[in-house]
C-alpha cells in the first residue's frame, strides 16, 4: 500500500496535519517575498551602492553582517540591513559593493553567492509540501465519501416472474 493510502500512526498523522502545512507556510511566506529580489541580484539588477559593515552576528554555522547601504546614484540609504553573500574577510567598518533589489531584510553583495539558490529551495519545498498536503486531503475526503455512501444493490438482468 502507498503512503498516501495508509495514513496511520501518530507520527505520520502529526507530520501530515501539522508538519506539511508548517513547511508550506514557512516556505511560501518567507521565501516568496525574497525570491524575485534574490534572482534579480544574481542577474545584476537592482540599485548599485556601497554596504558599510557595522556589526557581525554569528551563530553555530555562519556569521551575518549588518550595516548601512548607500546607493551610488541618488543617495538612497538603508540603515541596519543584512548583507547577503558577504565577501570573506569583511571586518567592522569595511565597505563592500552591493545591490539593493528590494529584499525585505537586506542587500546583496556583488561578489555573488548562493542565496538565490537557498531562497528558491525554500519556495520549492513550500510548494511541494502544499501540493502533497492538498492531495492527501482530497484523497481522505474521497475515501470518507465512498465509505459513507450506501452500496447499491446489484442490478439483475433476470426476467421477473
Image (cartoon, helix red, strand yellow):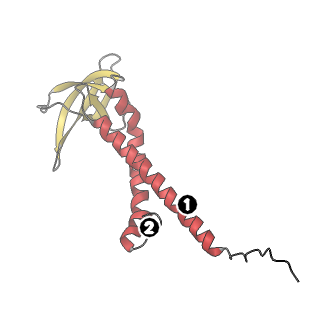
Q: For the residue labelled by badge 1, is the local secondary structure a helix, a strand or a loop?
A: helix
**Residue drawn at (57%, 68%), measured in percent from left and top?**
143
Q: Quadrant of residue 14?
A: bottom left
Please, is residue 59 above or below residue 86 in the view?
below
Q: Quadrant of residue 113?
A: top left
Which one is nearer the viewer's eye here, 125 or 152? 152
**Residue drawn at (27%, 28%), measured in percent from left and top?**
69
Q: Position of residue 66 (x, y in %)?
A: 23, 37
Q: Position of residue 118 (x, y in %)?
A: 30, 41
Please, is residue 142 above or below residue 81 in the view?
below
Farthest right residue in view: 161
- Quarter in which the C terminus is drawn: bottom right
Whole-angstrom CA distance, mark 2 to mark 1, is 18 Å
- Dot 2 corresponds to which residue? 1
Query: Can residue 6 be seen?
Result: yes
Q: Using the image, tell me which numbered label, if any, was put on residue 138.
A: 1
Q: For the residue labelled by badge 2, is the local secondary structure a helix, a strand or a loop?
A: loop
Local crowd size for mark 1, using a 10 Å CA cut-off: few (<14), some (14–19), many (≥20)? few
Q: Position of residue 125 (x, y in %)?
A: 38, 48
Mark toward the viewer: 2 or 1 = 2
Local crowd size for mark 2, using a 10 Å CA cut-off: few (<14), some (14–19), many (≥20)? few
Q: Position of residue 64 (x, y in %)?
A: 20, 40
- Quarter in which the N terminus is drawn: bottom left
Amino acid at each position: 500500500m502507498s503512503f498516501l493510502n495508509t495514513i496511520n500512526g501518530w507520527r505520520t498523522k502529526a507530520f501530515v496535519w501539522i508538519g506539511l502545512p508548517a513547511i508550506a507556510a514557512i516556505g511560501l511566506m518567507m521565501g516568496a517575498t525574497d525570491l524575485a529580489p534574490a534572482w534579480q541580484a544574481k542577474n545584476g539588477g537592482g540599485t548599485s551602492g556601497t554596504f558599510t559593515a557595522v556589526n557581525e552576528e554569528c551563530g553555530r554555522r555562519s556569521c551575518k553582517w549588518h550595516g548601512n547601504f548607500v546607493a551610488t546614484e541618488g543617495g538612497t540609504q538603508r540603515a541596519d540591513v543584512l548583507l547577503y553573500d558577504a565577501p570573506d574577510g569583511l571586518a567592522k567598518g569595511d565597505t563592500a559593493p552591493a545591490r539593493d533589489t528590494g529584499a525585505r531584510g537586506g542587500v546583496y553583495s556583488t561578489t555573488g553567492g548562493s542565496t538565490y539558490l537557498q531562497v528558491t529551495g525554500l519556495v520549492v519545498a513550500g510548494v511541494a509540501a502544499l501540493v502533497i498536503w492538498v492531495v492527501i486531503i482530497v484523497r481522505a475526503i474521497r475515501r470518507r465519501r465512498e465509505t459513507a455512501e450506501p452500496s447499491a444493490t446489484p442490478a439483475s438482468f433476470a426476467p421477473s416472474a
